[in-house]
Image: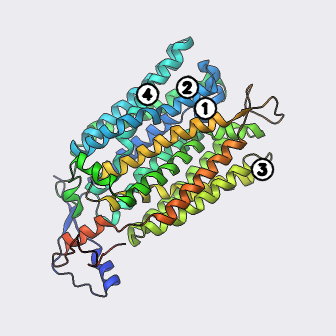
Amino acid sequence: METGQEVTATAQNVYAAVYGNSDLGSQLSFKVYKRRWFVLLVLCLLNCSNATIWLTFAPVANQSAQYLQVSLEDINWLSVVFMVVAIPLSFLTTWMLDTLGLRPTLILGSWLNMLGALLRFLGASRFDGSQKFLVVMLGQTFGAIAQPLIIFTPTKLAALWFPEDQRATANMFSSMSNPLGILLANLISPAVAKTSAQIPTLMVWYTVPAVVVCFLASAGIWSNKPPTPPSASAETSGSEPFIKGIKLLLRNKAYLILLVCFGSGIAVFTCFTTLLEQILCVQGYTNDFAGLCGALFIGVGVFGSAVFGFYVDKSKKFMEVIKINISMTALCCITFSVVCLLPQQKVAIAVVCALFGLFGFSIYPVAMELSVECSYPVGEATSAGLIFVSGQIQSVVYIVILQALTKQLADSPLSTCGDVIYSWKLPMMVMAGLCTVFTSLFVMFFNTRYRRLDAEVQATYKPYQRDERDSSAPCMYR
């Protein structure tokens, strides 16, 4: 049996800095286990694989439409189905995570992800005519069912397996493996499927990793949580019943602001990654360049997430980081909505995409941790999962609206889009406007104390007590 490494909470140092007194009395000790890194690795690989399945076709939309013999709008639905399917299943997923636990959720997600990848391969290589698209769509649907089982898990895993000073980092790694998968899709799909005939080969590239990670999850994850908790809050993780937790969230003003505003941010990023190739091709930019922009957007974003994740783990300045970064993200969105409409601006577009990712992606793991902090003791999967649901609902609405606002062009000399060309000028302005409005609302009105960190201080250092009903009592983290 694996032995644990003894750790202590970091609250004493922070308390001393805030109150000038580090004497908090007797201190509880907690153990962490090396196996936590394997569980984190499996989740990262699974999240990455699912993301590549999600956006396989977006970077090669024209080739995919030609091979599957459907329209570009039908190809977009291969991505949109992830949002549509995730919405009704999200409540079941949050209940499953907080009630049944981490292990059955991850293993079920890995099997659904693998079955979806296999169905896509069979549909693309073994069927003809309209059946080809239908089977591929069925495979995408299986992947979409798997997505909430996977993407809701990072905050739960971080809370159950990692100590307080590693939670944001663990959340960052597991959350950013999803955009890393999007990055790989943006690089691999254009490189492999240069012509429509190479779409079946592309399916193989994404099927093999799905099979491998399914084996790792099924054989390697043995329990929902470690033998002993890594922190005081881990002992009561998901302590509120599911329905009661939902009611508490709906009465939490700070959480509702985060739910709506950050959900809008998720929607903007989903639109960007799904529609990027179709937006840029109008002005003559190739699929390879669109893939490069997507790679910069995500690659620089993952780097930013790592930097800010480590910083937040040490400083606990969740609100400061997210408010500054979300404001810079809105500025980048406005800039992109202008430069993407101009020809021969490769450098400007690439730089804006990189900055857009740097500030935007760094928000995600911080916001997921913040959702738990402002809603504790509601279960981590419930608080983080509902934000994802909000993002999915708004993503579907945004994509439908933006596509409806496009205008077909009779001619565009520079276009590399194929036979049908659309103007994205109005949709881009609308997207920038929505991003600006919700960013402004969040910066002005969001404020919360960090309930989970407060609870851990009280549980870890016995003499320190704070009456929840007494608003004048000192609050450790704000």
Q: CA distance from mark 4 to mark 2?
A: 20 Å
Q: CA distance from mark 4 to mark 3?
A: 37 Å
Provide the residue designation for mark 2.
Answer: 201
**Left or right: where does residue 221 sit relative to residue 423?**
left
The residue most toward the top is: 128
Residue at 69% over, 55% down: 335
| Image side of residue 466 versus residue 391, left or right | left
Q: Say which mark, if any, is on residue 192.
A: 1
Visible in this render: residue 31? yes
- Along the polypeptide, which appears first: circle 3 or circle 1? 1
Q: Nearer the viewer, mark 3 or mark 1?
A: 3
Instruction: Check residue 345 in the rendering and tell me which mark sits there, or answer none.
Output: 3
In terms of secondary structure, where does tag 1 sit?
Answer: helix
Q: Quadrant of residue 209?
A: top left
Question: In the depicted view, which residue is nearer to us: 327 or 216?
Answer: 327
Residue behind mark 4: 141
Compare residues 461 and 408 and report the one nearer the observer.
Answer: 408
The answer to whether the residues at label 3 and label 2 have Cβ atoms under 8 Å apart is no
Q: What's the amino acid at mark 3?
A: Gln
C-alpha distance separating marks 2 and 1:
7 Å
- Where is residue 210 shown, x and y percent of the image? 41, 34
Secondary structure found at label 3: loop
Crowding near the residue tagged with mark 4, few <14, some 14–19, many ≥20 C-alpha atoms within 10 Å: many
